Image (cartoon, helix red, strand yellow):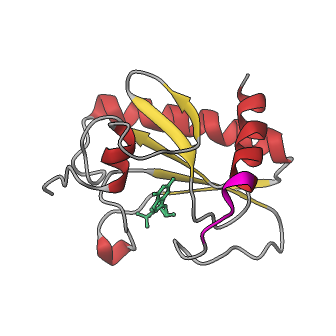
Amino acid sequence: MSYDQQNIFAKILRGELPCIKLYEDSKTMAFMDIMPQTDGHALVIPKEAAATIFDLTPESLAATILITQKIAIAARKAFSAPGVLIAQTNGAAAMQSVPHLHFHVIPRREGDAMRMHAVFQEDMEKLRKLAAEIIAALN
Ligand code: DGP
């Protein structure tokens, strides 16, 4: 799949758009989803320009899934979450709305009311507080 250099996550990676950052290294970045499906919903992306899992090099995929695990462990600890949903979409037919590969890390608890995908925009101050809890759990 061709890569759109103007997609939102490409702009975040270039520093052209802000994000509430959780983690960054030479190959990956993690930040809060601004349309969270549950409190603490985070995203992990490779820095490599890849729209879907079919486009990414194995090296970047390995780095990204390792950081996804790291963020999931931190989110589970930060929110005492009994479950964590990891999701990844490829193509509009799979409900992908941002064409830069990303893993969703979504803390879950039994009976929670998971919000609809990419609909509700969260208050930024609340997102910053939740991010601080994940960052504290990362360290
Ligand atoms: P998907 O639909 O699987 O491609 O997921 C894209 C996610 O990105 C969705 O949960 C909403 C989120 N999102 C959309 N725009 C922005 C943005 O500008 N910043 C951040 N942090 N997340 C965004």
Residue 126, percent from left and from top = 75, 55
Q: Residue furthest right?
A: 80
What is the x, y in percent for residue 46? Answer: 37, 38
Q: Is residue 40 visible?
A: no
Magenta segment = 121-125
Give the image quarter of residue 57. top left
> In the current view of this chain or complex, which residue is farthest to the left?
2
44 vs 62: above or below = below
Q: How many numbered circles are shown?
A: 0
Nearer to me, 78 or 34: 34
Q: Residue at x 24, y 41 (%)?
A: 49
- Residue 135, image quadrant: top right
Q: Percent x, y for residue 71? A: 63, 38
Camera-side residue of 28 and 131: 131
In the rendered image, is residue 99 in sight? yes
Tell me the quadrant of the picture where the C terminus can be found: top right
Please give left or right for residue 44 compared with residue 126 in the image. left
Residue located 77% across and 46% down the image:
129
From the top left corner, tell me how far across and down residue 16 is, in percent.
35, 42
- Residue 41 within the magenta-colored segment of the rendering: no
> Residue at horizontal 66%, vertical 42%?
72
- Nearest the camera: 8 or 92? 8
Q: Is residue 111 above or below residue 98?
A: below
